[in-house]
Image: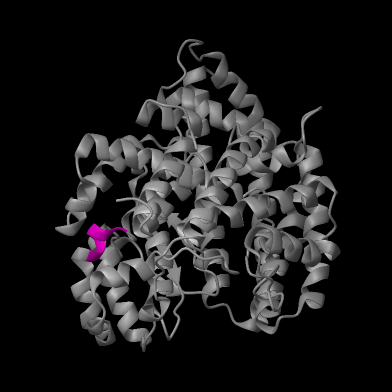
Amino acid sequence: MKPTEAYQWLLDYSKTTAYYQSAMGLLHWDQRTCLPKEGRAHRSEQLAAMTSLVHRRATDPGFGEILAEAEAGKNADDNLSDEAVNLREWRRNYDRTTRIPESLAVLIARASSAGELAWQTARQQNDWEDFLPYLERIVDLKRQEAQALSKGGKEIYDALIDDFEPGETAAEIEKLFTKLENATFKLLEKIEAAPRKPDPAVLRGACPPAAQEAFIIKVITHLGYNFDAGRMDFSAHPFTSAIGPGDVRITTRFDPDSFVKGLFSSIHETGHALYSHGLPPKHWGTPLGSSISMAIHESQSRMWENLVGRSRGFWKHFYPAARTHFPWLGKTGLDEFLFALNEVTPSLIRTEADEVTYNLHIIMRFKLERMLIDGQLEPQDLPDAWNGAMERYFHILPQNHSEGVMQDIHWSSGAFGYFPSYALGNMYAAQFYAKAQKELGDLPEMFATGEFSPLLGWLRGNVHSRGSRLLPRDLVRAATGADLDADYLIAFLEAKYEKAYGLRG
């Protein structure tokens, strides 16, 4: 087979595999939104069977042989063409996947599905003892996976990080996190000593689900979410499912006493969806039509949620509509509302944390899961380790496991290595935003007039449309002209919150 014929075969094969993966995505979406309780065991077996099918396709020796034939015709100096990028990512995925035995991949899929379903019930009932055996099984299997993937002399946790962040290592992440952690504690000290404090009570009032849903739809549609190419449903843990071109779904959840939680989780998921919608559709089913990393994905969701959604410009535009949907806001001025909205205070729940303390939640989880995978910490000891870390970082303790060690879905579904993506995403977001503002002008002023399309257009051109052409660190360098640096996020947070708390003019 000629290299050109081999490449065309790989394109067709890759797209067929993507259809199977798309079907798996639909099964996962259904599981998290509307699966009947008695269908759980069958769903686990469905996902296990589909995982086996996809794994066989990904590790088929015939695929490896044809990949080698296609690579033989590649120009050694050509690294960024469509063909070169697809070959690079196919090779990376093939070499990675073939190191995982099919039997292990199936066991992980089955255990992750069962673990996630068990977590949903255990979290509601605060039943750690019931959930623990599922978590122990998942951790054991993920350790086996990390060992199988690990290259000699490297920390095995790196192998799991690489699944979400190509090219990253725990050691490099630790350097960025240490810098961010130190700066965050210094900023928190200033905020705690600030003379003025917000009143969080102004954010609470009767928030009927219908009113929340109507306001959220108004907001995210204006930001650019296309309901003709997606839908919004409800789940225990908000998420986004990119099923395929023209089908990117989001979920949310409501608090009856505050529309803020549902709104910001929805804006967060909208950021993910906007990225998925912006990937080059003609390359769907190939690596080039996919996102390059979860941190880049999270940079989009965290940017829209925080840098846009918590800005004065955003609320100058949307506050009148918020008052229409939630009339009790009529007694609260915009300044008072914004100060409460951007309150900085230690909290138990990661998804409800403010911009400043949020990164500490991630750094804490990064350290814990790193120890879990490396064997320095066992699942049975996780609650004590969790509570100890909460006390060190936030000086508060959970009253139960549901608001503590069981609050996140990630470990129950086997997503070890994912958590660092959130804080890395915040760093990428701040760096992208700073560059966009430099090129486009005063973004908050644009937001105040309802203009969000200039920012979305900049992101489409500089991030979304590139798909996986560039690795994350190369992408941020191409888009901003600088290496990834925590200083952009630190500078943004310091400027915003020192002003908000009256620490600077």
What main secondary structure does the magenta stretch of the protein show? helix
User: Residue 227: x percent and y percent?
Assistant: 29, 65
Q: Residue drawn at (68%, 38%), measured in percent from left and top?
A: 170
Residue 228 lies left or right of residue 451; in this view the side is: right
Q: Which residues are magenta?
A: 311-315
User: Residue 110: x percent and y percent?
Assistant: 73, 62
Residue 283 visible in image: no
Q: Is residue 170 above or below residue 87?
A: below
Question: Which residue is nearer to you in this view: 253 or 191?
Answer: 191
* The N terminus sits in image quarter: top right
User: Residue 166: x percent and y percent?
Assistant: 58, 35
Q: Residue drawn at (77%, 35%), measured in percent from left and top?
A: 155
Question: Which residue is nearer to you in this view: 102 or 280?
Answer: 280
Residue at the farthest left position: 449
User: Residue 476: x percent and y percent?
Assistant: 42, 32
Is residue 313 highlighted in magenta? yes
Q: Is residue 372 above or below residue 120?
A: above
